[in-house]
Amino acid sequence: MFNFNTIDKNWTLFLDRDGVINFERNNDYVTTWAEFEFYDESKKALPLLAQKFSTIVITTNQKGVGRGIMTEDALTTIHQNMVSDINKMGGRIDHIFYCTDLENDSINRKPQPGMALQAKEKFPSIDFTKSIMVGNRTSDMEFGRNAGLHTVFLATTHPETAFPNTLIDYRFNHLLEFANAIQ
């Protein structure tokens, strides 16, 4: 466990996308911008988080591209529109790392730490001991642990997930609750 009072501009925030920033489609993929819907809480949280963290990145598994359900161009369009809207809200996303691999043991597919290693390569100032992974699945929490990050679980889509849990440092109902807790 870490103390929220230690979080300053030297910290990095890793965010999952679906189920954290936007509604996750039940047993389906967000394949177009028209299907992407922000949580109201994330709209309010992202500007607060932008003030608190030096670097904010998204790490998201996107198997739908690997399966041919959507194109990488469609994913790029979703991400460009999402980042544009987040910027208009006063928030910030510094980079989006995504994995389209189908193999669950791919180094870049969560829960493996590949996307965290990519983030460290792109942003050398990232210190994993001063980084938090926020996600809505235990695979996000495993990813955080595998990369040496602190973990925050959001109970947006899987409220049945047990807590306390060795994979989870803190648990909140949504992103705004987390953002308010660290202010």
Image: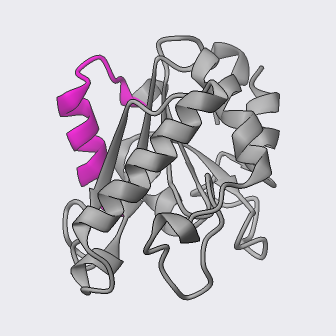
Residue 32 higher or lower than 131, as above or below: below
Residue that sits furthest to the top in the current view: 9
Q: In which quarter of the image is residue 22?
A: bottom right
Left/right of residue 157 with respect to residue 117 in the rendered view: right
Query: x, y (%) of residue 43?
Result: 71, 41
Furthest-front residue in this view: 34
Residue 2 in sight in this render: no
Q: Which residue is drawn at 81% across and 55% down?
A: 173
Q: How far from the left and from the top, in percent, is residue 69?
A: 32, 86
Q: Which residue is drawn at 20% across and 30% down?
A: 122
Identify the magenta region. 110-128
Query: How far across and how far down the image is residue 49, in percent?
Result: 64, 27
Please say if 181 is above or below 70: above
Q: Looking at the rendering, in which quadrant would you find the N terminus?
A: top right
Q: Quadrant of residue 90?
A: top right
Above/below status of 13 relative to 55: below
The verdict on residue 78 being magenta is no
